[in-house]
Image: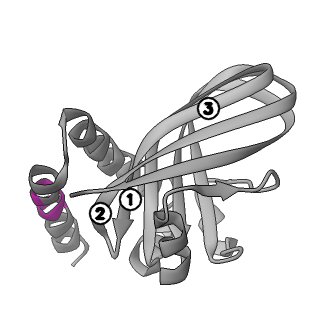
């Protein structure tokens, strides 16, 4: 059954990429997002319950992050509603504090309700300074819960970052035409 779901998801992705992605960059990000989803599920299979039950989610397959006192991060991702790609998103982060280094990470944001997803789709969604991501690792999703109908999981890919900082995250959403 799980294999059939995977085959159906890949077929749907291939159809979606061919029909809705606007350019080669979108197609590349969509393919990377699918690989990131697979890597996240391998790291913590419990995340599947979020992918299966969330009204929507955004996968940022690679966010680049760097800082020396003032820090920043950016990346591109794919927005899914009920498991179907509906648009692209980008993330920009700015922070100030005791921080140094660079890092690449994968991030997925799950929206528990249609209202939370619709708020994101308005185009200028922001997380407050105190918003933080749960580091995806084996079994961590078991006790993870939504906060205000949103939960964020992150998986470091490479690099080292030390930080004690305050900042915010801003997202833009661009629906497929």
Percent x, y of residue 167:
79, 41
Nearest the viewer among 97 and 44 is 97
The residue segment tinted magenta is 10-15
What quarter of the picture does the N terminus occupy? bottom left
Q: Which residue is under mark 1?
A: 79
Q: Circle 2 sits on which residue?
A: 86
Front residue of this view, candidates 22 and 46: 22
Query: Which mark, by number, is residue 2?
Result: none
Alpha carbon of mark 1 to alpha carbon of mark 2: how far? 6 Å
Earlier sequence position, callout 3 versus callout 2: 3
- The residue at the point 43 percent across, 40 percent down is 76
Q: Earlier in the sequence, mark 1 or mark 2?
A: 1
Question: In which quarter of the view is residue 9 placed?
Answer: bottom left
Q: Is residue 169 rendered to the left or right of residue 6?
A: right
Would you call the spot at circle 1 few (<14 residues within 10 Å), some (14-19), or many (20 or more)? many
Q: Is residue 89 above or below residue 151?
A: above
Whether 8 is among the magenta residues is no
Q: How is the image coloured?
A: one colour
| Residue 10, horizontal then vertical, whole percent | 17, 59
**N-term mark: 1 or 3:** 3
How crowded pointer 3 is (Cα within 10 Å; few <14, some 14-19, many 20+) is rated as: some
Say which residue label 3 marks: 73
């Amino acid at each position: 059954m799980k294999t059939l779901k995977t085959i159906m998801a890949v077929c749907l992705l291939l159809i979606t990429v061919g029909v809705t992605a606007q350019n080669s960059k979108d197609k590349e990000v969509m393919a990377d997002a699918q690989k990131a989803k697979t890597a996240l599920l391998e790291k913590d299979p419990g995340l599947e319950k979020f992918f299966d039950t969330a009204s929507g989610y955004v996968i940022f397959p690679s966010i680049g992050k760097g800082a020396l006192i003032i820090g920043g991060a950016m990346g591109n991702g794919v927005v899914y509603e009920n498991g179907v790609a509906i648009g692209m998103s980008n993330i920009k982060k700015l922070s100030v504090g005791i921080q140094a280094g660079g890092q690449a990470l994968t991030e997925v944001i799950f929206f528990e309700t249609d209202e939370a997803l619709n708020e994101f789709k308005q185009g200028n969604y922001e997380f407050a300074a105190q918003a933080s991501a749960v580091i995806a690792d084996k079994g961590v999703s078991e006790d993870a819960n939504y906060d205000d109908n949103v939960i964020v999981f992150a998986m470091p890919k490479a690099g080292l970052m030390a930080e004690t900082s305050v900042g915010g995250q801003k997202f833009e959403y661009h629906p497929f035409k």
